Image (cartoon, rainbow, N blue to C red):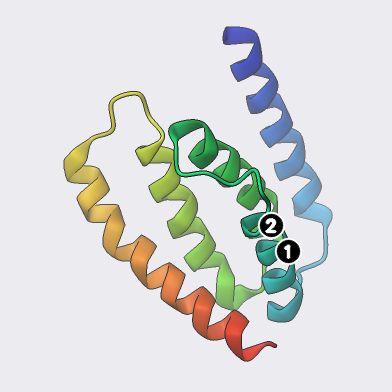
Amino acid sequence: MKKTLSVLIAAGTLLGAAACSAPQMTSEETCSRVKAITTSPTSSSDKFGMTRLANQIRPIEATASEELQDPLQSIVDYLDEAAKKEPDTAKLDELKAGYTAAGQKLSQTCGAAQ
């Protein structure tokens, strides 16, 4: 378990470093990438699925359009907390409003991008 966590942290660090030099995507490109991962048959609502989804969104968020960076970060924050072994319910309640608003923003932006 510790090895897996170490690998995930290292991968996240590398992706974060790579994202620093990556060009910023347009909202349309961001929507396309988000749709590709959210329509995947491996998406699930259990803790493992939430962790996996958050880890797939992180590199997208790093190069997302300015319009969608904050909503994607709100989603990652909520998924990270919800996926914990013992999530802080007060913090989850706090993050839920941002998560809901982020979902609405993605729906508006990505629905309009079609």
Q: Residue 53: horizontal and vertical position, in percent?
A: 58, 45
The answer to whether 103 appears left or right of 30 in the picture is left
Q: Quadrant of the C terminus?
A: bottom right
The answer to whether 1 appears left or right of 40 in the picture is left
Residue at 37%, 61% (x, y): give it. 99
Q: Residue furthest left?
A: 90
Q: Residues within 10 Å of mark 2 (few under 14, many from 20)?
A: many
Q: How many marks?
A: 2
Q: Secondary structure at mark 1?
A: helix
Q: Which residue was labeled with disc 2? A: 60
Q: Which residue was labeled with disc 1? A: 33
Q: Above or below — where is 26 with respect to 10? A: below
Q: Residues within 10 Å of mark 1 (few under 14, many from 20)?
A: some
Residue at 44%, 40% (x, y): give it. 80
The answer to whether 34 appears left or right of 89 in the picture is right
Q: Residue furthest front?
A: 41
Q: Residue 55: horizontal and vertical position, in percent?
A: 61, 41
Residue situated in front as seen by the camera: 17 or 71: 71
Residue at 70%, 43% (x, y): give it. 16
